[in-house]
Image (cartoon, rainbow, N blue to C red):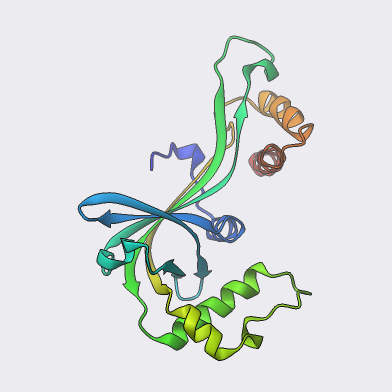
Amino acid sequence: MYIPKNFTIDNEEVIFDVIEKNSFATLFSQHNGEPYATHLPLLLNKEEGILYGHFARPNEQWKDIANQKVLVVFQGPHCYISPSWYETNQAVPTWNYVAIHVYGQMEIVEDAQEVLNSLVNMVLKYEKPDSSYHLEDVDSNYIKGMSKGIVGFKIKVNKIEAKAKLSQNHPANRQELVIKQLEGSLDQNNRQIAELMKRNLVSEK
């Protein structure tokens, strides 16, 4: 990924936070000699440096993905930035965004218990703390039958590229004008970018 120096995220905790908050990712590999992508939720184990997930079995990407070096893209908040918000119109539009690229080695998980553990952990992540649903309460025979329709995998992370393009290449007063506009928006992406820009400005002072 192209990352100008001042757009680089080098704080590991910030990177992990972006991944965990934007965990519906895009997984790229080579399939039948061509680029191929699947959109799916992934679970990060920070201590192991491993991403866990599963394919639908009819998705043939899994059939030749074992041992491939794969790319996973986590897309954070993003939004359009209008020059009309600046102190001058002598500028061009741009797009602010956060993105994490994770590279790693793919391994198909054959162990049924390891696959089940990853499914339980994924449900725990996405269900609300007070939810009445617990995967462990579902009939084991039903889970066993449903599990035949998926292929579990894990990705050993070996490289991470992280980028936050937040108007750092513009003066602080212009960034503040952009923040004001984004904060007044009802769009969640706009408001998230505004908050990230504010944090970045504070850290630079």
In the picture shown, does residue 147 fall above or below 44? below
Q: In this view, does 98 lie to the left or right of 115?
A: right
x then y, percent, for residue 158: 35, 63
Q: Is residue 10 left or right of residue 126?
A: left
In the picture shown, does residue 179 fall above or below 88? below
> In the depicted view, which residue is nearer to us: 62 or 44?
62
x then y, percent, for residue 173: 70, 24
Query: At 66% across and 87% down in the image, what residue appears?
Result: 137
Query: At 73% across and 69% down in the image, what residue appears?
Result: 128
> In the depicted view, which residue is nearer to us: 108 or 20?
108
Q: Is residue 205 left or right of residue 41?
A: right
Quarter-of-image position of residue 125: bottom right
Quarter-of-image position of residue 121: bottom right
Q: Quadrant of the N terminus?
A: top left
In the picture shown, does residue 199 fall above or below 79? below
x then y, percent, for residue 78: 59, 39
x then y, percent, for residue 18: 58, 55
Q: In which quarter of the image is the C terminus?
A: top right
